[in-house]
Amino acid sequence: MRRLLIAGLLFLTSSILLAAPPEGSRGRFFVERWAEFQEDVSNTEDGRWRVNDEEASLHPVYGKRYETTANGLIQIPVTEDLFEIEAAEIYLELWGGHPGNSHKRFTLNGRGPYLIPDGGAAAGNCTYTYPAIPLKVSHLVRGSNSFQFTGDRGDASWGHYIIDNARLRLYLKADNPRIAKEGLADIPVSVALADASKQLRDMTGLRLAAGAGALPPIESVTYYGRYLDFDDNGDGIEDDWHGFTLDRQPVNVIGRAVEQPFRASWDTSMIPDQPGDMAVRALVRFKSGINYWTPLLDGLSFPADRGNVKRYRCPVLPVPFWSRDHKPNSATFDLPDDLSRARSAELMLKVWDGGEGDVKTPFRINGHPYDILTERPDKFHPLVIFRKIPIDLSHLKPGRNEIVLLSGSDHHGIEVFLPGPVIKLRYE
Protein backbone atom coordinates (compact mmCIF):
# COMPACT_ATOMS: atom_id res chain seq x y z
CA MET A 1 0.00 0.00 0.00
CA ARG A 2 2.84 2.38 0.90
CA ARG A 3 4.51 1.73 -2.47
CA LEU A 4 1.29 2.59 -4.27
CA LEU A 5 0.99 5.82 -2.28
CA ILE A 6 4.58 6.81 -3.08
CA ALA A 7 4.12 5.99 -6.76
CA GLY A 8 0.99 8.14 -6.82
CA LEU A 9 2.81 11.01 -5.17
CA LEU A 10 5.65 10.76 -7.70
CA PHE A 11 3.18 10.77 -10.59
CA LEU A 12 1.34 13.82 -9.29
CA THR A 13 4.54 15.69 -8.58
CA SER A 14 5.97 14.84 -12.02
CA SER A 15 2.84 16.18 -13.73
CA ILE A 16 3.07 19.38 -11.70
CA LEU A 17 6.76 19.82 -12.55
CA LEU A 18 6.01 19.38 -16.25
CA ALA A 19 3.34 22.06 -16.04
CA ALA A 20 5.93 24.73 -15.20
CA PRO A 21 7.13 26.77 -18.20
CA PRO A 22 10.72 25.91 -19.17
CA GLU A 23 13.60 28.35 -18.80
CA GLY A 24 13.85 30.35 -22.01
CA SER A 25 15.57 33.27 -23.64
CA ARG A 26 12.86 35.79 -22.73
CA GLY A 27 12.78 37.79 -19.53
CA ARG A 28 10.12 37.11 -16.89
CA PHE A 29 8.33 39.41 -14.48
CA PHE A 30 7.18 38.20 -11.09
CA VAL A 31 6.13 39.21 -7.61
CA GLU A 32 7.00 37.32 -4.47
CA ARG A 33 6.13 37.10 -0.82
CA TRP A 34 8.07 35.56 2.07
CA ALA A 35 6.08 33.70 4.70
CA GLU A 36 5.96 35.45 8.07
CA PHE A 37 6.15 33.21 11.12
CA GLN A 38 3.06 33.24 13.34
CA GLU A 39 3.13 31.39 16.64
CA ASP A 40 -0.64 30.98 16.79
CA VAL A 41 -0.66 29.43 13.31
CA SER A 42 2.33 27.12 13.59
CA ASN A 43 1.85 26.19 17.24
CA THR A 44 5.46 26.73 18.30
CA GLU A 45 7.58 29.67 19.40
CA ASP A 46 11.10 29.38 18.00
CA GLY A 47 10.53 31.26 14.74
CA ARG A 48 11.05 28.30 12.42
CA TRP A 49 8.52 25.93 10.91
CA ARG A 50 9.10 22.47 12.31
CA VAL A 51 7.58 19.42 10.64
CA ASN A 52 7.11 16.05 12.35
CA ASP A 53 6.15 12.59 11.24
CA GLU A 54 2.57 11.48 11.75
CA GLU A 55 3.28 9.55 14.96
CA ALA A 56 5.60 12.07 16.66
CA SER A 57 2.98 13.37 19.11
CA LEU A 58 2.84 9.99 20.84
CA HIS A 59 6.48 8.97 20.37
CA PRO A 60 7.52 7.16 23.58
CA VAL A 61 10.84 9.05 23.75
CA TYR A 62 10.30 12.37 21.94
CA GLY A 63 6.54 12.87 22.14
CA LYS A 64 6.69 15.30 25.07
CA ARG A 65 9.40 17.54 23.60
CA TYR A 66 8.25 21.03 22.62
CA GLU A 67 9.17 20.43 18.97
CA THR A 68 6.43 17.84 18.54
CA THR A 69 3.71 20.43 19.18
CA ALA A 70 4.58 22.09 15.83
CA ASN A 71 1.90 21.41 13.22
CA GLY A 72 3.88 22.08 10.01
CA LEU A 73 1.47 24.75 8.77
CA ILE A 74 2.62 27.80 6.77
CA GLN A 75 0.24 30.48 5.55
CA ILE A 76 1.08 32.97 2.79
CA PRO A 77 -1.38 35.61 1.51
CA VAL A 78 -2.03 36.26 -2.19
CA THR A 79 -3.56 39.56 -3.28
CA GLU A 80 -2.97 39.25 -7.04
CA ASP A 81 -5.62 38.35 -9.61
CA LEU A 82 -4.90 34.68 -10.35
CA PHE A 83 -6.18 35.06 -13.93
CA GLU A 84 -3.14 37.30 -14.55
CA ILE A 85 -0.61 34.75 -13.20
CA GLU A 86 1.34 32.56 -15.61
CA ALA A 87 3.07 30.21 -13.13
CA ALA A 88 3.84 29.86 -9.44
CA GLU A 89 6.43 28.20 -7.21
CA ILE A 90 7.33 27.90 -3.55
CA TYR A 91 10.98 28.10 -2.50
CA LEU A 92 12.25 26.72 0.80
CA GLU A 93 15.32 27.13 3.00
CA LEU A 94 15.16 23.55 4.23
CA TRP A 95 17.16 21.65 6.83
CA GLY A 96 16.73 18.04 5.71
CA GLY A 97 16.16 16.87 9.25
CA HIS A 98 17.13 13.81 11.20
CA PRO A 99 19.07 11.49 8.89
CA GLY A 100 16.78 8.79 7.55
CA ASN A 101 13.47 10.71 7.55
CA SER A 102 11.75 10.44 4.18
CA HIS A 103 8.99 11.47 1.77
CA LYS A 104 8.76 15.13 2.70
CA ARG A 105 5.66 16.59 1.11
CA PHE A 106 2.90 19.16 1.44
CA THR A 107 -0.56 20.03 0.28
CA LEU A 108 -1.63 23.49 -0.89
CA ASN A 109 -5.09 24.41 0.36
CA GLY A 110 -5.76 20.68 0.65
CA ARG A 111 -4.73 20.13 -2.98
CA GLY A 112 -1.80 18.17 -4.30
CA PRO A 113 0.10 16.48 -2.84
CA TYR A 114 3.51 17.90 -3.75
CA LEU A 115 6.71 15.96 -3.08
CA ILE A 116 9.78 17.83 -1.83
CA PRO A 117 13.05 16.65 -3.44
CA ASP A 118 14.85 14.57 -0.82
CA GLY A 119 18.45 15.71 -1.31
CA GLY A 120 19.89 12.61 0.36
CA ALA A 121 18.35 12.77 3.85
CA ALA A 122 16.39 9.51 3.42
CA ALA A 123 19.71 7.71 2.79
CA GLY A 124 21.02 8.96 6.14
CA ASN A 125 22.95 12.07 5.08
CA CYS A 126 23.01 15.57 6.57
CA THR A 127 21.40 17.94 4.06
CA TYR A 128 20.33 21.52 3.60
CA THR A 129 18.56 22.31 0.34
CA TYR A 130 16.68 25.11 -1.43
CA PRO A 131 13.99 23.47 -3.54
CA ALA A 132 11.87 25.66 -5.82
CA ILE A 133 8.72 23.58 -6.35
CA PRO A 134 6.32 24.54 -9.16
CA LEU A 135 2.70 24.93 -8.06
CA LYS A 136 -0.50 24.67 -10.03
CA VAL A 137 -1.96 28.17 -10.17
CA SER A 138 -5.42 26.62 -9.83
CA HIS A 139 -4.42 25.30 -6.40
CA LEU A 140 -3.91 28.85 -5.11
CA VAL A 141 -6.66 31.09 -3.81
CA ARG A 142 -6.91 34.83 -3.52
CA GLY A 143 -6.42 35.48 0.18
CA SER A 144 -4.67 33.24 2.72
CA ASN A 145 -3.05 30.11 1.29
CA SER A 146 -2.27 27.15 3.56
CA PHE A 147 0.77 24.97 2.97
CA GLN A 148 0.50 21.87 5.17
CA PHE A 149 3.83 20.03 5.42
CA THR A 150 4.39 16.48 6.60
CA GLY A 151 6.80 13.57 6.14
CA ASP A 152 7.55 9.98 7.15
CA ARG A 153 9.85 8.71 9.87
CA GLY A 154 11.71 6.39 7.51
CA ASP A 155 14.88 5.08 9.18
CA ALA A 156 15.14 8.00 11.60
CA SER A 157 14.36 7.58 15.28
CA TRP A 158 12.03 10.58 14.90
CA GLY A 159 10.86 12.07 11.61
CA HIS A 160 11.59 15.78 11.91
CA TYR A 161 12.76 18.57 9.56
CA ILE A 162 12.83 22.38 9.64
CA ILE A 163 11.84 25.10 7.17
CA ASP A 164 13.77 28.25 8.05
CA ASN A 165 12.10 30.37 5.36
CA ALA A 166 9.51 29.94 2.62
CA ARG A 167 8.83 32.20 -0.36
CA LEU A 168 5.91 32.17 -2.78
CA ARG A 169 6.77 33.50 -6.24
CA LEU A 170 4.09 34.41 -8.83
CA TYR A 171 5.14 34.85 -12.46
CA LEU A 172 3.09 37.42 -14.35
CA LYS A 173 1.56 36.86 -17.78
CA ALA A 174 3.05 39.01 -20.53
CA ASP A 175 -0.17 41.01 -20.79
CA ASN A 176 -0.50 41.55 -17.05
CA PRO A 177 -1.73 45.16 -16.76
CA ARG A 178 0.68 45.91 -13.93
CA ILE A 179 3.66 45.51 -16.29
CA ALA A 180 2.36 48.22 -18.60
CA LYS A 181 1.30 50.41 -15.68
CA GLU A 182 4.85 50.35 -14.31
CA GLY A 183 6.26 51.36 -17.71
CA LEU A 184 8.10 48.07 -18.24
CA ALA A 185 6.35 46.60 -21.26
CA ASP A 186 8.60 48.00 -23.99
CA ILE A 187 11.94 48.46 -22.21
CA PRO A 188 14.27 45.48 -22.79
CA VAL A 189 16.71 44.84 -19.95
CA SER A 190 19.59 42.38 -20.26
CA VAL A 191 23.06 41.51 -18.97
CA ALA A 192 26.29 42.27 -20.80
CA LEU A 193 29.96 41.74 -20.07
CA ALA A 194 31.84 44.99 -19.53
CA ASP A 195 34.07 44.42 -22.57
CA ALA A 196 31.25 43.05 -24.78
CA SER A 197 33.10 39.74 -25.30
CA LYS A 198 32.01 36.27 -24.28
CA GLN A 199 35.28 35.21 -22.67
CA LEU A 200 35.63 35.26 -18.90
CA ARG A 201 38.87 36.50 -17.35
CA ASP A 202 39.83 35.97 -13.69
CA MET A 203 37.94 39.18 -12.93
CA THR A 204 35.11 39.89 -15.34
CA GLY A 205 32.90 42.97 -15.21
CA LEU A 206 29.14 42.68 -15.64
CA ARG A 207 26.67 45.46 -16.35
CA LEU A 208 22.97 45.96 -16.83
CA ALA A 209 22.04 46.91 -20.38
CA ALA A 210 18.72 48.59 -21.15
CA GLY A 211 17.09 49.80 -24.33
CA ALA A 212 15.79 53.27 -25.02
CA GLY A 213 13.65 54.88 -22.37
CA ALA A 214 14.01 55.48 -18.67
CA LEU A 215 13.74 52.50 -16.35
CA PRO A 216 11.57 52.76 -13.26
CA PRO A 217 13.59 53.12 -10.04
CA ILE A 218 15.64 50.01 -9.29
CA GLU A 219 16.22 48.72 -5.77
CA SER A 220 18.93 46.16 -6.57
CA VAL A 221 20.45 43.97 -9.26
CA THR A 222 21.79 40.51 -8.39
CA TYR A 223 23.85 38.55 -10.93
CA TYR A 224 23.70 34.75 -11.09
CA GLY A 225 25.90 32.31 -13.01
CA ARG A 226 25.36 28.88 -14.50
CA TYR A 227 28.54 26.81 -14.47
CA LEU A 228 30.01 23.60 -13.05
CA ASP A 229 31.24 23.94 -9.46
CA PHE A 230 30.50 23.02 -5.82
CA ASP A 231 26.86 21.96 -5.41
CA ASP A 232 26.00 24.91 -3.18
CA ASN A 233 22.21 24.41 -3.10
CA GLY A 234 22.36 20.69 -2.35
CA ASP A 235 20.23 19.52 -5.27
CA GLY A 236 22.85 17.05 -6.46
CA ILE A 237 23.59 19.00 -9.67
CA GLU A 238 27.00 20.64 -10.11
CA ASP A 239 26.54 22.12 -13.60
CA ASP A 240 23.74 24.38 -12.50
CA TRP A 241 22.69 27.89 -11.51
CA HIS A 242 24.65 28.81 -8.39
CA GLY A 243 23.52 30.95 -5.49
CA PHE A 244 21.04 30.43 -2.68
CA THR A 245 19.67 32.36 0.30
CA LEU A 246 20.47 32.40 3.99
CA ASP A 247 17.93 34.25 6.10
CA ARG A 248 16.42 35.42 2.76
CA GLN A 249 19.67 37.10 1.64
CA PRO A 250 21.53 36.00 -1.53
CA VAL A 251 24.75 34.02 -0.96
CA ASN A 252 27.40 32.76 -3.42
CA VAL A 253 26.04 34.84 -6.28
CA ILE A 254 28.27 36.60 -8.80
CA GLY A 255 27.55 39.97 -7.23
CA ARG A 256 24.85 42.37 -6.08
CA ALA A 257 24.58 46.10 -6.81
CA VAL A 258 22.29 48.61 -5.12
CA GLU A 259 23.44 51.81 -6.83
CA GLN A 260 23.71 53.07 -10.39
CA PRO A 261 25.17 51.91 -12.74
CA PHE A 262 24.53 48.48 -11.13
CA ARG A 263 27.81 46.85 -12.10
CA ALA A 264 29.48 43.81 -10.56
CA SER A 265 32.83 42.02 -10.82
CA TRP A 266 32.84 38.25 -11.22
CA ASP A 267 35.83 36.48 -9.66
CA THR A 268 36.20 33.31 -11.73
CA SER A 269 39.77 32.53 -10.70
CA MET A 270 38.84 29.35 -8.76
CA ILE A 271 35.92 28.16 -10.88
CA PRO A 272 36.81 24.70 -12.24
CA ASP A 273 37.49 23.89 -15.88
CA GLN A 274 34.17 23.64 -17.69
CA PRO A 275 32.81 20.85 -19.89
CA GLY A 276 30.66 23.33 -21.84
CA ASP A 277 29.51 26.91 -22.09
CA MET A 278 28.46 29.02 -19.11
CA ALA A 279 25.68 31.61 -18.72
CA VAL A 280 24.66 34.58 -16.57
CA ARG A 281 21.41 36.35 -15.83
CA ALA A 282 20.32 39.12 -13.49
CA LEU A 283 17.51 39.47 -10.99
CA VAL A 284 16.32 43.07 -11.15
CA ARG A 285 14.20 44.30 -8.26
CA PHE A 286 12.21 47.45 -8.99
CA LYS A 287 11.18 49.65 -6.09
CA SER A 288 7.53 49.22 -7.09
CA GLY A 289 7.67 45.56 -5.97
CA ILE A 290 7.86 44.00 -9.43
CA ASN A 291 10.90 41.81 -10.10
CA TYR A 292 12.43 40.72 -13.40
CA TRP A 293 14.65 37.87 -14.53
CA THR A 294 16.66 39.07 -17.52
CA PRO A 295 17.14 36.85 -20.57
CA LEU A 296 20.20 34.60 -20.44
CA LEU A 297 23.58 35.73 -21.65
CA ASP A 298 24.99 32.34 -22.63
CA GLY A 299 27.83 30.94 -24.72
CA LEU A 300 30.41 32.13 -22.17
CA SER A 301 33.77 30.36 -21.88
CA PHE A 302 37.27 30.66 -20.46
CA PRO A 303 40.21 31.65 -22.71
CA ALA A 304 42.49 28.88 -23.89
CA ASP A 305 45.48 30.24 -21.96
CA ARG A 306 43.76 30.09 -18.56
CA GLY A 307 45.37 27.98 -15.84
CA ASN A 308 43.59 24.71 -15.04
CA VAL A 309 41.35 24.50 -11.96
CA LYS A 310 40.54 20.99 -10.73
CA ARG A 311 38.12 19.70 -8.07
CA TYR A 312 38.88 16.94 -5.59
CA ARG A 313 36.02 15.42 -3.62
CA CYS A 314 35.87 12.83 -0.87
CA PRO A 315 34.81 9.69 -2.77
CA VAL A 316 33.34 8.17 0.40
CA LEU A 317 31.61 10.27 3.05
CA PRO A 318 30.53 9.20 6.54
CA VAL A 319 26.77 8.63 6.74
CA PRO A 320 25.85 10.87 8.42
CA PHE A 321 28.86 13.22 8.37
CA TRP A 322 28.53 14.77 11.81
CA SER A 323 30.31 14.95 15.15
CA ARG A 324 29.12 15.49 18.71
CA ASP A 325 30.01 14.39 22.24
CA HIS A 326 33.75 14.10 21.39
CA LYS A 327 33.16 11.43 18.72
CA PRO A 328 35.29 12.30 15.67
CA ASN A 329 34.37 11.63 12.06
CA SER A 330 36.68 11.70 9.07
CA ALA A 331 36.91 11.51 5.30
CA THR A 332 39.76 11.37 2.79
CA PHE A 333 40.45 12.81 -0.65
CA ASP A 334 43.21 11.99 -3.14
CA LEU A 335 45.47 14.50 -4.89
CA PRO A 336 47.81 13.92 -7.86
CA ASP A 337 51.34 12.62 -7.25
CA ASP A 338 52.82 15.82 -8.68
CA LEU A 339 51.65 19.08 -7.07
CA SER A 340 54.57 21.19 -8.26
CA ARG A 341 52.39 23.19 -10.69
CA ALA A 342 49.73 24.01 -8.07
CA ARG A 343 49.59 27.74 -7.32
CA SER A 344 46.54 28.09 -5.05
CA ALA A 345 44.02 25.92 -3.23
CA GLU A 346 40.55 26.45 -1.80
CA LEU A 347 38.16 24.56 0.48
CA MET A 348 34.40 24.76 -0.10
CA LEU A 349 31.82 23.29 2.26
CA LYS A 350 28.57 23.96 4.06
CA VAL A 351 27.90 22.98 7.68
CA TRP A 352 25.30 23.25 10.41
CA ASP A 353 27.06 24.95 13.30
CA GLY A 354 25.45 23.55 16.43
CA GLY A 355 28.49 24.01 18.62
CA GLU A 356 32.02 22.67 19.05
CA GLY A 357 31.88 22.54 22.86
CA ASP A 358 35.35 22.60 24.41
CA VAL A 359 37.12 21.51 21.22
CA LYS A 360 39.57 24.16 19.98
CA THR A 361 40.17 22.80 16.46
CA PRO A 362 36.92 21.15 15.25
CA PHE A 363 37.96 20.89 11.57
CA ARG A 364 41.43 19.81 10.40
CA ILE A 365 43.06 18.96 7.07
CA ASN A 366 46.05 16.69 7.57
CA GLY A 367 46.17 17.90 11.16
CA HIS A 368 46.06 21.61 10.26
CA PRO A 369 43.05 23.56 11.67
CA TYR A 370 40.69 25.56 9.45
CA ASP A 371 37.99 27.85 10.82
CA ILE A 372 34.62 26.71 9.47
CA LEU A 373 32.35 27.85 12.34
CA THR A 374 31.18 31.10 13.92
CA GLU A 375 32.00 32.75 17.21
CA ARG A 376 28.41 32.86 18.49
CA PRO A 377 28.35 32.25 22.25
CA ASP A 378 24.86 30.68 22.12
CA LYS A 379 24.68 27.79 19.66
CA PHE A 380 21.51 26.16 20.92
CA HIS A 381 19.93 27.04 17.55
CA PRO A 382 22.26 25.74 14.82
CA LEU A 383 23.21 28.10 12.01
CA VAL A 384 23.99 27.28 8.37
CA ILE A 385 27.57 28.26 7.51
CA PHE A 386 28.87 28.40 3.92
CA ARG A 387 32.64 28.66 3.52
CA LYS A 388 35.16 29.29 0.76
CA ILE A 389 38.54 29.17 2.53
CA PRO A 390 42.03 29.50 1.00
CA ILE A 391 44.22 26.50 1.87
CA ASP A 392 47.96 26.67 2.50
CA LEU A 393 49.48 24.46 -0.19
CA SER A 394 52.06 23.21 2.31
CA HIS A 395 49.19 21.58 4.24
CA LEU A 396 48.40 19.32 1.28
CA LYS A 397 50.34 16.32 0.05
CA PRO A 398 50.35 13.99 -2.95
CA GLY A 399 48.06 11.01 -2.66
CA ARG A 400 45.74 10.55 0.30
CA ASN A 401 44.76 13.53 2.48
CA GLU A 402 42.57 13.38 5.59
CA ILE A 403 39.80 15.64 6.94
CA VAL A 404 38.79 15.23 10.59
CA LEU A 405 35.65 16.72 12.19
CA LEU A 406 35.33 16.86 15.99
CA SER A 407 32.77 18.49 18.30
CA GLY A 408 32.62 18.33 22.06
CA SER A 409 28.98 19.45 22.21
CA ASP A 410 26.54 16.91 23.63
CA HIS A 411 23.62 18.68 21.93
CA HIS A 412 23.53 19.46 18.18
CA GLY A 413 27.23 19.30 17.39
CA ILE A 414 28.42 19.94 13.82
CA GLU A 415 26.89 18.56 10.62
CA VAL A 416 28.66 18.60 7.24
CA PHE A 417 26.02 18.82 4.51
CA LEU A 418 26.15 17.09 1.17
CA PRO A 419 28.12 17.26 -1.09
CA GLY A 420 30.74 17.26 1.69
CA PRO A 421 34.06 19.11 1.54
CA VAL A 422 35.45 19.94 -1.89
CA ILE A 423 39.08 20.93 -2.48
CA LYS A 424 40.02 22.96 -5.56
CA LEU A 425 43.53 23.48 -6.91
CA ARG A 426 44.61 25.98 -9.55
CA TYR A 427 47.62 25.02 -11.62
CA GLU A 428 49.90 27.33 -13.58
Image (spheres, helix red, strand yellow):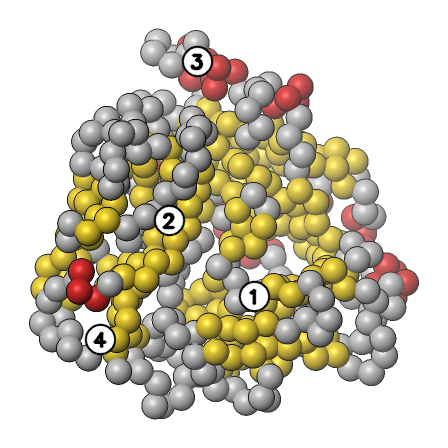
Element type where label 4 sits in the image = strand
Within-10-Å neighbours for mark 2: few <14, some 14–19, many 20+: many
What label sits on residue 255 in the rendered view?
A: 1
**Left or right of 57: which side holds 188?**
right
Q: Is residue 288 left or right of residue 170?
A: right
Mark 1–mark 4 distance (CA, rounded to whole Å): 27 Å
Q: Which residue is mark 2?
A: 350
Q: Position of residue 404 (x, y in %)?
A: 19, 45
> Spatial distance from mark 2 to mark 3, Cα to Cα?
28 Å
- Can residue 274 be seen in the rendering of this structure? yes
Tell me the crowding category of disc 3: few under 14, some 14 to 19, or many 20 or more residues within 10 angstroms, Cα based. few
Q: Residues within 10 Å of mark 4 (few under 14, many from 20)?
A: some
Q: Give the residue type at disc 2.
A: Lys
Is disc 1 in contact with disc 2, using a CB cutoff of under 8 Å? Answer: no
For badge 3, the amino acid type reads Arg
Kind of element beneath mark 2: strand
Camera-side residue of 312 and 406: 406
Does 117 appear above or below 219?
above
Contact between marks 1 and 3 (CB within 8 A): the answer is no
- In this figure, which residue is indicated by the disc labeled 4? 342
Q: Of callouts 2 and 3, which one flags the residue occurring earlier in the amino acid sequence?
A: 3
Q: Say what amino acid the circle numbered 1 marks.
A: Gly
Upstream in the sequence, badge 3 or badge 4?
Answer: 3
C-alpha span from label 2 to label 4: 24 Å
Sequence-wise first label, 1 or 4: 1
**Horizontal relation, residue 183 to residue 150: left or right:** right
Disc 1 to disc 3, C-alpha distance: 42 Å
List the residue tagged with mark 3.
Answer: 65
Q: Residue at x 71, y 41 (%)?
A: 140
- How many numbered badges does the structure rendering display? 4
Q: Percent from the top left, x then y, of residue 408?
A: 25, 29
- Residue 385 picture quarter: top left
